[in-house]
Amino acid sequence: MFIVADLAESDELLVDGGEGRHAVEVLRLTPGERVRIGDGRGAVADSEVVSAGADGLRVAVLNRFEVPEPDPEFVLVQALPKGDRGPLAIELATELGVDRIVPWAASRCVTRWRDDRVAKGVAKWRAAAHAASKQSRRPHVPEVTELMTTREVCGLLGDADLGLVLHEQARRPLAELQVPRSGTVAVVVGPEGGLTDGEVVAFRAAGANAVRLGAEVLRTSTAGAAALAALSARTRWA
């Protein structure tokens, strides 16, 4: 899957820039090969390579179609992990179907995005979501929002049809909850140091359910992906 900014209504398309260079110089695509082009918003064109050169990859469109937004919508509220675990969390979540990713500045986050680092951090997460969408051939690239505070996350949970907070001490397993087949399902994943009592109380007051996935304690970079897989198995994959 190649993702372009605009899937123009024409019989022939040019994939240029970084996508084009990757197709020509790394993948070494040649005329006659079949490729899929998308705009990251659900529009897709199955195409055939016409030429590959310095200007990029030129393709002839064979078929166009639209892929509807997934339902239910999965939102991942991800506390900022340490180091490179942030992009890893985004890659895994993207491959497993997340639709919206919310970076969250939790109280116990070791990593802090200071004012001058917020834009860089968000851009890095968006790049990870874009790359993972290409790899997993997703027609919709997940939205990565701006950094949110706990108060803002509470507002998000209040608007969701189902809000979940992953907590290792929760008595109720996720498997016991009724998951809506439509609407918005939001999952909160805390930082390495865990959630504070105040955060748990605030999220519950906003209508969220504290749940556990199993007996094992997962890393913050993998917990969201595990929850998304469990939710998909009961909704989209069923």
Image (cartoon, helix red, strand yellow):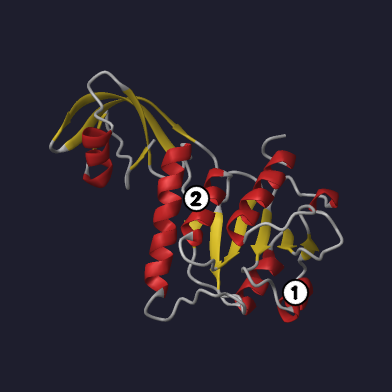
The residue shown at (26%, 27%) is 29
Q: In this orientation, which residue lies closer to the viewer: 4 or 17?
A: 17
Residue most extreme to the left: 54
State the image coordinates of residue 50 (x, y, percent, origin top left): 21, 24
Residue topped by disc 1? 200
The answer to which of marks 2 and 1 sits earlier in the sequence is 2
How many C-alpha atoms fall within 10 Å of the one at disc 1: few (<14), some, or many (≥20)?
some
Instruction: Pick the quarter of the image with the C terminus.
Output: top right
Name the residue type under label 1.
Answer: Val
The residue depicted at 87 percent of the width and 62 percent of the height is 171
In the rendered view, tell whether residue 39 sits above or below residue 100. Answer: above
Identify the residue at the far front of this view. Answer: 216
Residue 83: x, y in percent? 47, 65
Instruction: Give the residue at x 45% y 46%.
Output: 132
Q: Is residue 215 or residue 195 the one in the foreground?
A: 215
Query: Which residue is found at the position 48% from the left and 45% from the top?
Result: 140
Quarter of the view holding residue 127 = bottom left
Which amino acid type corresponds to the residue marked 2 in the rendered image?
Glu
> Left or right: where does residue 127 sit relative to residue 20?
right
Q: Position of residue 151 (x, y in %)?
A: 63, 79
Describe the element under mark 1 as helix, strand or loop: helix
Which residue in the structure is indicated by mark 2?
Answer: 91
Answer yes or no: is residue 41 visible: no
